[in-house]
Structures are given as structure tokens and as C-alpha cells.
Image (cartoon, rainbow, N blue to C red):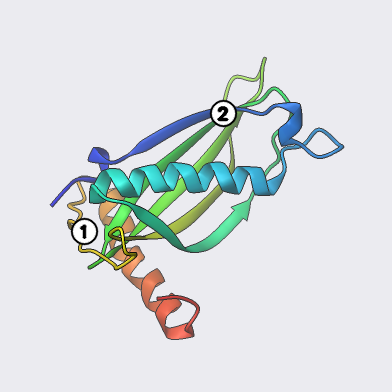
């Protein structure tokens, strides 16, 4: 059993011109890629093995980021099941000369631990440490049940 802090991953990126559209705004696909990488690192640190993305749930583009913004992407495990894990990923943008960062995106990513043949492998359970982590832990089960009941992913 592991705590969410043991695998928490914080990644920093600078929005460069090649990451943006013609208006100088960060492309959504680039942000999703960065969030997926942070979530994969978090999952692999928790499972101590290779993990693959199985589902992205409720991605919300809340605000845009511009060239020069510094992004902080935080990935934290909410719950582990038998072979899969749910990870909350939040992306924050900090502009030069602006005091506080802005939450620009958040989503729940699901990953499955696999061996070299691609067969799902068991993962350690998660032990929430705070009230917020406990709430996320409980809500993760509801999100998973919704996904499984709609047949969108296993």
C-alpha cells in the first residue's frame, strides 16, 4: 500500500511558439500530451512497472495559455484498483508579471500496469492521507463505475 504523495509528479513546461496555434495560444493537443506524460510518470512510480493510458475522463479546458507562459502540471493518484489506477492531473499557467497561476485544465486519467507482453499486472493499493484525498478516493470508484456501466472502457 502506498500514499498518493509517493508517486505525485510535478512537471514544468514553457509554452514555446512551436506549441501554439497561429494566435499564439497553446494547442490543446500539446497540453493533453504533456498531461498524459505527467500521469504516466505518476502511474509508473506507483506501480513500479510500465503503465499505459486506458481512459481520459472529464477533460476541461478552462482557460488558454500563451507563448512564454510557464505551465506546472501536477499528477496525483486518486485510487488504485486491481491493475488500473486513476490519476487527477491539473495544469496551471503562470504568466510573467501576473502574481497567481491560473488552472487551465484538469482531467482524470486512467492507466493500466502491464508486463512486457502487454498483460495487465497487479498494482499496490492507495492509502489516502487527507480528507481531500479520501474524497477523491471515494469519488474515483463512482467515476469508474460510470465508465464501466457505459461500456466506454474497462
* Residue drawn where x is 32% and y is 64% of the image: 117
Task: Residue 152 in the image: state x and y as whole percent.
Answer: 50, 78
Sort mark 1 into few (<14), some (14-19) or many (20+) by Cα contacts within 10 Å. Answer: many
* Residue drawn where x is 26% and y is 50% of the image: 49
> Horizontally, is 7 left or right of 101 in the view?
left
* Residue drawn where x is 20% and y is 54% of the image: 126
Disc 2, SS: strand
Question: CA separation, marks 1 and 2?
Answer: 29 Å
Quick one: 122 or 110, which is closer to the camera?
122
Task: Residue 59 in the image: state x and y as whole percent.
Answer: 57, 57
Task: Residue 28 in the image: state x and y as whole percent.
Answer: 68, 47
Quick one: 148 or 139, which is closer to the camera?
148
Instruction: Residue 34: name its quadrant.
Output: top right
- Vertically, is 38 above or below 10? below
Q: Which residue is mark 2?
A: 13
The furthest residue to the left: 1
Task: Residue 57 in the image: state x and y as whole percent.
Answer: 51, 63
> Horizontally, is 120 left or right of 74 in the view?
left
> Horizontally, is 121 left or right of 28 in the view?
left
Instruction: Residue 92: name its quadrant.
Output: top right
Amino acid at each position: 500500500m502506498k500514499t498518493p504523495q509517493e508517486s505525485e509528479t510535478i512537471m514544468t513546461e514553457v509554452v514555446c511558439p512551436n506549441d501554439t496555434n497561429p494566435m499564439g495560444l497553446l494547442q490543446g493537443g500539446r497540453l493533453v500530451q504533456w498531461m498524459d506524460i505527467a500521469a504516466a510518470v505518476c502511474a509508473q512510480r506507483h506501480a513500479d512497472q510500465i503503465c499505459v493510458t486506458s481512459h481520459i475522463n472529464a477533460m476541461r479546458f478552462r482557460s488558454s495559455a500563451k507563448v512564454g507562459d510557464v505551465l506546472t502540471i501536477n499528477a496525483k493518484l486518486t485510487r488504485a484498483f486491481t491493475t488500473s489506477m486513476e490519476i487527477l492531473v491539473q495544469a496551471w499557467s503562470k504568466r510573467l508579471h501576473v502574481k497567481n497561476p491560473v488552472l487551465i485544465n484538469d482531467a482524470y486519467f486512467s492507466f493500466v500496469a502491464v508486463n512486457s507482453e502487454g498483460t495487465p499486472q497487479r498494482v499496490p493499493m492507495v492509502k489516502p492521507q487527507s480528507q481531500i484525498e479520501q474524497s477523491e478516493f471515494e469519488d474515483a470508484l463512482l467515476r469508474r463505475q460510470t465508465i464501466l456501466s457505459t461500456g466506454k472502457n474497462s
